[in-house]
Image: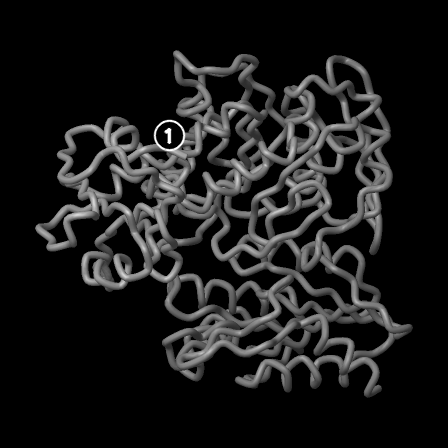
Amino acid sequence: MKTVNEVYNSITNATLTGNGDIQITGITADSREVKKGSLFICLVGAHVNGHNYIDKAVQAGAAAVLVSEDVKVPTEVAVIRVNDTRKAMQECVPYFYEYPANKMRMIGVTGTNGKTTTTHIIGHILRKQGYKVGIIGTVHVLIGDKTYPIHNTTPDVVDLQHILAQMVEEGVTHCVMEVSSHALALGRTAGVEYDTAVFTNLTQDHLDFHHTFENYLAAKCKLFEQVSATNQHKGKKGAVINIDDPYGKRVMEKNSAPLITYGTEGRGSLEASHLTITAKTSAYDIVWDGITYHNHMRITGLFNVYNTLAAVGACLNEGIGMDAIIQALSDFTAVPGRFELIEEGQPFAVVVDYAHTPDGLENILQTAKKIVEHRILVVFGCGGDRDATKRPIMGRIAAQYGDVVFVTSDNPRTEDPVQIVKDVEVGVKEGLRDGVRYEVIVDRAEAIHKAIAQAQAGDVVIIAGKGHEDYQILKDKTIHFDDREVARDALKER
């Protein structure tokens, strides 16, 4: 615990009113989570102003408030006044938790696609060497063998520092994090010193937030600027960058840390060659430091070759030898919702994947094209309140690779699902090949059932967009919905 004075002194350009000797038991920006002794941070957002919840926070036992507006509180409640509560939060929260990221090795993975699988492969290799690993990402938070739910790919400053502190308390030696562009742009990773930074790829996504592709790229590059910074607390920094990606060189320009590049066909200091990819496995050579290592894995797809190379590079930077890495890779299995095969004894393949970007969808359909014996049936949609420009692009990709396309709903959020599928349908019509047919079925469960009912021996059914998610976000509520459950039900009905 820290006193109000101690927290106040960690913030630049602040003023304090009230008793600075009060002990602070915790920090939160959510009035619903205030407990006796909490410091309540009043954030000002686009739709919510935290200053409107001060009375509720005080009633719940807040000992102090961090504000940027004039407020009235009882005399026993300390007030720290600043110009910008968000910037002040980025300073005081890591201090309050005593900079937990400085007490572990921190591996950050950024990119449009592949972050989740890459972090899980890194975690798997590290665990095989006897390290205690924490993972923070899209699917969940893992601390050792314990799983916790998560709401954002990279949590906000308060949640992230709390999670990192919990990891330190439980003896975690290596924390592997998905680092989203939102988090880097909004400063959610403030107070986190990264040791290894990994870049997977960059394709169109999140332009609703970043507005331009250059802004999106600049956000991703911040991770490499951080790992390259001088006067850090820990040594042995490193960057791992996909040299095959068109933007890999742009990321390299922002990096001055020791570098491992990875790629295929003779590119990269870490290179994959002689690829053999089947429906359920992949085998290839990895060349490192002039030596060739054969790698055979129980995951498929060219995209997973890249994810694996990224993970290998990160683990090399963490001092693990290639022989140990290759041995660990041999028994890695797929991450939930990432090219996950649904098996109920059917004579065709059913794959559930999180692909929700044009590049992600194209990657899994290219993989399906290589393993399919007959037809590809695609079920997918696009989320509401997100970058609408990618909808026709994804529709076009589905029609270019699929033989039967079912356009359906994803997480419509506050938008009309009918309008979203109409936006997607524009691209489907543009990309239609001879003999390809498509249907628009707004009800996602109905679309999945219909695709599986129509599948024949040798087909591959791709259900894309939601992957591991077990919910669907509608305009007025969130309902339970799991593509894997619905697919199993449909298979059993056959």
Q: Is residue 260 left or right of residue 122?
A: left
Above or below, comparing residue 307 to residue 429 in the picture: above
In the image shown, does 404 or 86 lie closer to the viewer? 86
Q: Amino acid at mark 1?
A: Tyr
* Quadrant including the C terminus: bottom right
Q: Is residue 64 left or right of residue 435?
A: left
Q: How is the image coloured?
A: one colour
Residue named by callout 1: 95
Residue at position x 84%, y 33% in the image: 295
Q: Is residue 315 left or right of residue 94?
A: right
Q: Is residue 453 left or right of residue 106?
A: right
Residue 346: x and y in percent read 88, 74
Residue 186: x and y in percent read 33, 43
Residue 196: x and y in percent read 56, 25
Above or below, comparing residue 414 to residue 290 in the picture: below
Residue at position x 26%, y 33% in the image: 21
Residue at position x 13%, y 39% in the image: 17
Residue at position x 53%, y 84% in the image: 442
